[in-house]
Structures are given as C-alpha cells and as structure tokens.
Amino acid sequence: MQNPVTGKPTKQQRGELKTSRIPIKVVPTEGPLPRKPTWIRAKAPTDPKVQKLKSLIRDHKLNTVCEEASCPNLGECFSHGTATFMVMGDLCTRRCPFCDVAHGRPQPLDENEPAQLAHAVALMQLRYIVITSVDRDDLRDGGAEHFVKCIDAVRNSVPGIKIEILTPDFRGRMDVALEKFNQSQPDVFNHNLETVPSLYKKVRPGADYQWSLQLIKNFKQRHPNVTSKSGIMLGLGEEIEEVKQVLRDLREHDCDMLTLGQYLQPSRHHLAVERFIHPDEFDELGLYAESLGFNNVASAPMVRSSYHADLQAQGDTSVQE
C-alpha cells in the first residue's frame, strides 16, 4: 500500500498495519504522546541545505534512514551535508515495533543503485558515509552482495572516502553473507543489538540476541582490521544491570565501538516509552562502557547509531554532547 502521489509507503504501513501481526500486541497510545523532558530537543530543519540535500537524494532515487526512520537529528545532520543512506528500498521484511521504517514486500534490487549512490556522494563531497538497509529476508544473502557493490562503487567514485555499513542480522544466512565481504570491506562494520535479550520478543520479533552477537564476532574474526560497532536504545523497560550485561557481552564478542541513546516513540502505534533516561545515567553507563575497553563510546539521550559517526570513528568523544 503506497501513496499514489509520492509512491512512498503509507502511514498505515509504518504504524497500525505493521505492528498488528507480531507476537506481543502493541496497544496504541491513547491521547497525545508523553511530553519529552527538557533534555530531549531536536532542532527544526530550517537550514536551506536541508532542502538542497533532500532534492539531491530524490533526484538520484535514493533513500535515507534519516527520513525513513524519522530520526530527530535529521535537521542537524542534513545541515552539515551528511546523511546515512538506506539501500535496497524503503520496505522492510520485518515488523519491529520500535522502528518507523515501513513493512511490506520489497521490490527487486535496483542494479543502478550503487552507481547512483556513488554519484550522489561525489556531488556532496563527502569524506565519510554510512550505508544501511532495510531487512531483506527475501534475498539469499540478505543483501550482502549489494552492500559490497555499493562499497566498491563509492570508493571508485571518491578515492580515500571512509565507509561505515550498518547491516541487518542476515538471519539464517550468516556464512553466505559474510563470504561476500571477502571481496570488499567497509572501514566500520556496525550491527545494532537494539535492546536487552529479555525484551527481544517484544522489540525485535524475528531476531535473535545470540545470533546478532555472533555476527559481530564472526565478521571481526574474518576482518580484524575493520572496526566493529553496535548500539542499543534505552527506555523500553530494560534494567540497568541488563544493559551492563549487554555491554559485557559485546566486548566478549569483539565489539570495538558503542552507541547508547534514548528510544523515542515514532507514533501511537509503536512501542511506548517506558522511561526517559536522565543524561546523568547515560554518563554513568558511558563511563562503565569505557572501563570495559570500548575504543569509543557515545552515550547520551539524542545519540543515534549513525549520529556523528565520522567523529566517533576518529575517536572524538564530543559526539555525545
């Protein structure tokens, strides 16, 4: 079901239709969504650069997770001329009730997409990009080969560029998927755990905590010179001790970098925020993560997996301010 004018997924695919067929029923929030605390503020996208970048992305028939996932940092990132590109379409084969990306039957892969992405990146004069994707459980390799084609196309177009990929879990296809990356590797391999294992059935239906940990470890074993990265959201009902255990698990599975941020409810049909985590708690968790040996930690309410990813990859700790 798509909007006949824009060709984009409808709100229903992002909301009630998406979350209506998952193991744990999502009860729609009645009335207005809870008021956000004073420490959660996103700047409105008023900079002319934002519209210019949006036009460039549309002209090249590309998607960004910034828009598809309703990221609160869109205005800031677009104003700086940066974006996280979402390849392989804008319809996801999963129904995760925390995410605002639409669910549906994806279209066949666009073979021109890697070249279009590379051209756009060159026009934007970027030196660091993040490439992510929807889940593509319909593909034999989960879309791994398409990631590789995008990496190659961008590197050929912009020599010296740094590339981070944020991948799905390649469920049931790990060996096939990882084999594809023997050809070309990113500079940073990122796969998010999203939450603590006790909440997986509620937050990540169809995913498996141990599988995701093993994906990070297996990629790192194959490519030890590639930085590994992961992140989780807070505020979905997890206990702090559970979060600390996740951080220990990540280090035991060779994860180098970490992001911790506040979950924000995209619509009344998505999972509700159970608690707004105070910045002081994020600071404490950040210090704990650093004590475990992560190379770089970004821990603050507005931190997202790709937020200031270039600075984090360079070891800049100011990304959490």
Image (spheres, rainbow, N blue to C red):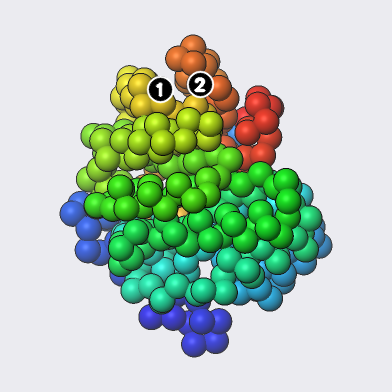
Q: Are marks 2 and 1 in contact (CB under 8 Å)?
A: yes
Instruction: Name the residue furthest left.
Output: 23
Compared with residue 93, is residue 312 higher up or lower down, i.e. above or below?
A: above
Compared with residue 36, is residue 312 higher up or lower down, i.e. above or below?
A: above
* Residue labelled with disc 1: 251
Residue at 47% from the left image edge and 19% from the top image edge:
289
Q: Which mark is residue 294?
A: 2
Secondary structure, mark 2, is loop
Q: Earlier in the sequence, mark 2 or mark 1?
A: 1
Residue at 34% from the left image edge and 40% from the top image edge:
215
**Quadrant in which the N terminus is drawn:** bottom left
Secondary structure, mark 1, is helix
Q: Amino acid at mark 2?
A: Phe
Compared with residue 318, is residue 110 higher up or lower down, i.e. above or below?
A: below
Compared with residue 39, is residue 297 higher up or lower down, i.e. above or below?
A: above
**Nearer to us in this view, 128 or 103:** 128
Q: Is residue 42 in view from this perspective?
A: no
